[in-house]
């Protein structure tokens, strides 16, 4: 489930990236367009399978089909029908795949960088407009993705749950206490028996919370810990 959750959160922004390519085409900004295409290729390889594995469930949960008329191959007067997808997740995946077919696939057999750049520039000029999606449509699909995700996996974990997941058992006990007592004295901290193997010294308390602070900073949770050995207290701060 965690693989799908991560993939869903990432896919929410793919459709905006596709729409951005069309805007870059209008501005003749080949460099940004090429960079966005490369990023989408990486994201599809990284998360596409996790999304595809839940398409059947998402189709049942989805409010209705998603259609983009005048997009992609259909916009290029190709004989294919416009894309129709059973959920917003499948639509974003399909739109991204189609964008890559239009702009990236023709480059696959070309090894010469100069030739590849020249072809991409031509493709962007000739086909970039086919990836145009209005910002209103982008926002609607992103909102539907969030609703589908909520139906499938439930509400996201609380900040406390996310923090505790990254801590050791003893660290969890101490942070859980500090979460409800954000300004705690060393005496109070000592009373959290499951957080210690024995009665800790002031220096041991300082060392323990420094390690917790380092771990929280590593994951950038927006939670800070202030330790004062002189005042013998520990404070938890929400940095957001």
Image (tube, rainbow, N blue to C red):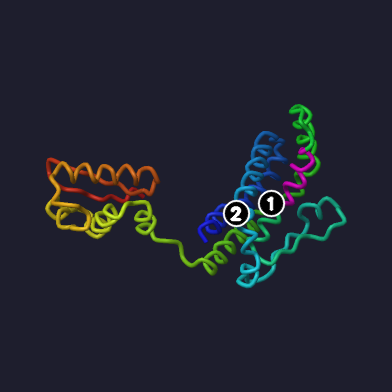
Q: Which residue is mark 1?
A: 96
Which residue reaches farthest front? 197
- The span picked out in magenta is 96-108
Q: Which residue is mark 2?
A: 11
**Residue depicted at 53% across the width and 54% down the height:** 6
Note whether 168 is above or below 53 in the view shown. Answer: above
Horizontally, residue 144 falls left or right of residue 112, namely left
Dot 2: few (<14), some (14–19), or many (≥20) neighbours within 10 Å?
many
Which percent across, then down, holds residue 181?
21, 58
Mark 2, secondary structure of its residue: helix
Q: CA distance from mark 1 to mark 2?
A: 9 Å
Mark 1, secondary structure of its residue: helix
Q: Is residue 43 magenta?
A: no
Pointer 1 with pointer 2, Cβ within 8 A? yes
Which percent across, then down, holds residue 4?
56, 58
Between discs 1 and 2, the one toward the N terminus: 2
**Prevailing SS of the magenta stretch:** helix
Residue 57: name its quadrant: bottom right
Horizontally, residue 207 falls left or right of residue 148, namely left
**Residue depicted at 60% across the width and 48% down the height:** 46
Mark carried by residue 217 = none
Which percent across, then down, holds residue 41?
66, 44
Q: Is residue 99 magenta?
A: yes
Which percent across, then down, holds residue 39?
63, 42
Dot 1: few (<14), some (14–19), or many (≥20) neighbours within 10 Å?
many
């Amino acid at each position: 489930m965690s693989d799908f959750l991560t993939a869903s959160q990432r896919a929410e922004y793919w459709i905006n990236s596709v729409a951005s390519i069309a805007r870059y085409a209008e501005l003749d900004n080949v460099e940004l367009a090429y960079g966005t295409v490369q990023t989408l290729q990486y994201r599809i390889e990284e998360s596409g399978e996790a999304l595809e594995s839940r398409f059947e469930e998402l189709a049942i949960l989805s409010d209705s089909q998603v259609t983009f008329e005048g997009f992609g191959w259909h916009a290029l007067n190709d004989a294919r029908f416009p894309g129709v997808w059973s959920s917003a997740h499948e639509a974003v995946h399909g739109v991204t795949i189609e964008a890559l077919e239009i702009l990236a696939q023709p480059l696959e057999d070309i090894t010469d960088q100069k030739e590849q750049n020249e072809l991409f520039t031509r493709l962007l000029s000739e086909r970039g407009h086919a990836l145009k999606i209005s910002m209103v449509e982008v926002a609607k699909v992103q909102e539907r993705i969030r609703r589908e995700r909520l139906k499938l996996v439930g509400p996201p974990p609380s900040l406390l749950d996310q923090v505790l997941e990254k801590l050791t058992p003893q660290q969890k006990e101490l942070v859980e206490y500090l979460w409800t007592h954000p300004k705690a004295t060393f005496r109070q901290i000592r009373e959290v028996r499951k957080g210690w193997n024995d009665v800790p010294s002031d220096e041991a308390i300082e060392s323990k919370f420094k390690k917790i602070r380092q771990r929280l900073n590593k994951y950038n949770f927006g939670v800070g810990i202030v330790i004062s050995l002189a005042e013998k207290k520990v404070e938890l701060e929400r940095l957001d």
